[in-house]
Amino acid sequence: MSELKDRLRADLTGSMKERDRLRASTLRMALTAVTNAEVAGKQARELDDGEVTGVLVSEAKKRREAATAYDDAGRAELAAKERAEADVLATYLPQPLSEDELVQLVTATVESQGAAGKGMSAMGPVMGQLKPNVAGRADGAAVAAEVRRQLTGG
């Protein structure tokens, strides 16, 4: 069983005992999303820590996007709630990469693949090698943009 999933369950129990409604509801939602991911597909299976992290990243991203939408609609109280939920989820995610760390990681991967100067045809292999290193630590679009920039010299 996933250690992260066990930690989520234990923290849910603790937050319920402490009567921390925001944390409890957020963890309940996260565990529901994990369970939904486990039963999706043809056969139910137990997710490992990496897959649970992926679910939490997705849920945190949904909260940030919802907060932005609520801000745009002038609903500050709902935006604040969504941000608070995203903050709770962030405590279970790996430390995000800084922009400089991302640039260095992409540069090292491009060099190790010998992809410098090969253009966009090398994007797939570079992204494939990068993906496990950035999972949960950087937005996929930002990683792809940096790889594209380095491969095209832009």
Image: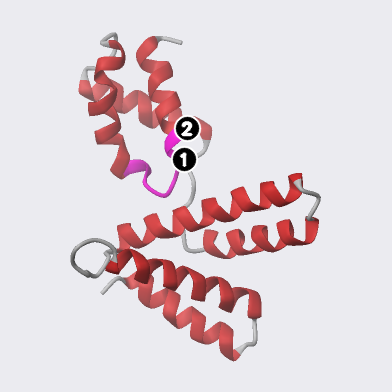
Q: Residue at x 22, y 27 (%)?
A: 125
The x, y position of residue 37, in whole percent, is 33, 64
Task: Point out the residue furthest to the bottom here.
Answer: 17
Which quadrant holds residue 24? bottom right
The x, y position of residue 80, in whole percent, is 73, 59
Q: Amino acid at mark 2?
A: Ala
Q: Is residue 73 above or below residue 98?
A: below
Per the image, is 137 magenta?
yes
Q: CA distance from mark 1 to mark 2?
A: 5 Å
The x, y position of residue 152, in whole percent, is 38, 11
How crowded is the residue under tag 1: few (<14 C-alpha within 10 Å), some, or many (20+)? some
Q: Is residue 23 above or below residue 149?
A: below
Q: Is residue 114 above or below residue 104?
A: above
Task: Point out the residue furthest to the left here.
Answer: 43
User: In the rendered structure, which segment of residues is drawn in magenta?
Assistant: 133-142
Answer yes or no: is residue 94 visible. Answer: no
Residues at circles 1 and 2 in contact by the CB criterion of under 8 Å: yes
Q: Amino acid at mark 1?
A: Asp
Which label belongs to residue 139? 1
Which label belongs to residue 142? 2
Per the image, is 121 magenta?
no
Question: In the picture, which quadrant includes the N terminus?
Answer: bottom left
State the residue in front, 8 or 25. Answer: 25
**In this rendering, would 110 be left or right of 90?**
left
Q: Residue at x 33, y 72 (%)?
A: 3
